[in-house]
Image (cartoon, grey):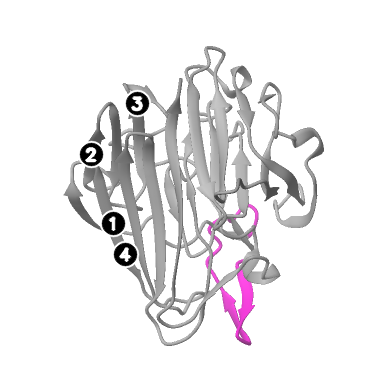
Amino acid sequence: MIPTGNQTVLRHGDLVAVVTEVGAALRTLTSGGRPLIAGFGPESLPVGYQGAVLAPWPNRIASGRYIFAGESHQLPLTEPDRGNALHGLVTSAAWHVEQPDPATARLTHRLWPQPGYPFLLDLEVVYALHTVGLEYTLTAVNAGDMAAPYGGSFHPYLVAGPGQVDDWTVQAPAAGYLTVDPDRLLPRSVVPVGALDFRERQSLRGVEVDHAFTDIAFDAAGSAALTLTDPTGQGVRLTWDRRCPWLQLCIPGPQRSALHRRALAVEPMTCPPDAFNSRVDLIVLQPGESTSMGLTIGPLG
């Protein structure tokens, strides 16, 4: 049995990706046989949301409760140890898969109204391999008759090479990050990056991070990039644009033994944690409106 359903293999040059029917997740991505992400096996379930599509919200909603348009809603607590609703509603959903060419997969899912999220969305994910890497696009359309709160993200675990993150360096153009309470990881306030300043290349040896970064320095074209590099100079690069003004970075802890300090989760987000309550960068989709976000993951060296 393959628990994530049918597996779609994409190829372009020496790039190979595998995408799952369940969750529309990116299961593996390699360049010349070298992994660019920490993937999972065909007979395994993903750990820690590996390669997951995060919609209609990324990160946490405190206690799974929010008020929208004057109505109170209660979501299932999918992070029960912290009492939060985590990473949306589609990570275990079945998606319809089309493969128009050997390098592209298009996956669609209708998110029907349900307790806690009584809104109707049509979601589309496109994975496309190009010479520079894998391009990922997530689009949401409000297919219902009332406004809907929305946020989106993607959850790859990047790897620069063999070994652990302590052997690698990172560079990312963020000047601030969101502090969180230590027990439930819920947001407090944005502060300067301080010891978590990755604007210049920084070793990850001994670094602990599970925070949403912001105040991102996008270039004149509206693009930003994070690089993760091993001692030989090879590694991986992730680029995104202004549609995602937040960037979650997480080094997995010992509770995820298979990933413990072996990858860096890098999640460009359209909004911060708990945006359904704070309303910070929350997208409100009117009936018929759509929104999209995208990123590219490619090799370095």
Does dot 2 land on a helix, a strand or a loop? strand
What residue type is disc 1 on?
A: Leu
How far apart are labels 2 and 1 at the CA level? 13 Å
The numbered dot on residue 109 is 4
| Residue 45 seen in this snapshot | no
Badge 1, how many Cα within 10 Å: few under 14, some, many 20+? many
Picture residue at 71% right of the left edge, 56% below the top: 186
**18 or 13, nearer to the observer:** 13
Residue placed under numbered mark 3 in the picture: 31
The percent position of residue 201, horizontal first and vertical second, equals 67, 26
What residue type is disc 3 on?
A: Ser
Badge 3, how many Cα within 10 Å: few under 14, some, many 20+? some
Give the extent of the magenta segment.
Answer: 63-83
Upstream in the sequence, badge 2 or badge 4? Answer: 2
How far apart are labels 1 and 4 at the CA level? 7 Å
Does dot 3 land on a helix, a strand or a loop? strand
Q: CB of mark 1 within 8 Å of CB of mark 4?
A: yes
In this rendering, the answer to whether 94 lies above or below 168 is: below
Helix, strand or loop for the magenta stretch, by majority = loop
The percent position of residue 22, horizontal first and vertical second, equals 31, 52
How far apart are labels 2 and 3 at the CA level? 14 Å
Q: Nearer the viewer, mark 3 or mark 1?
A: 3
Given the current orientation, which residue lies at the most extreme front position? Answer: 220
Upstream in the sequence, badge 3 or badge 1? Answer: 3
In this rendering, the answer to whether 134 lies above or below 22 is: above
Compared across the picture, whether 213 is left or right of 140 comes to right
The numbered dot on residue 107 is 1
Badge 4, how many Cα within 10 Å: few under 14, some, many 20+? some
Does dot 4 land on a helix, a strand or a loop? strand
Picture residue at 43% right of the left edge, 83% below the top: 287
The numbered dot on residue 9 is 2
How far apart are labels 2 and 4 at the CA level? 19 Å
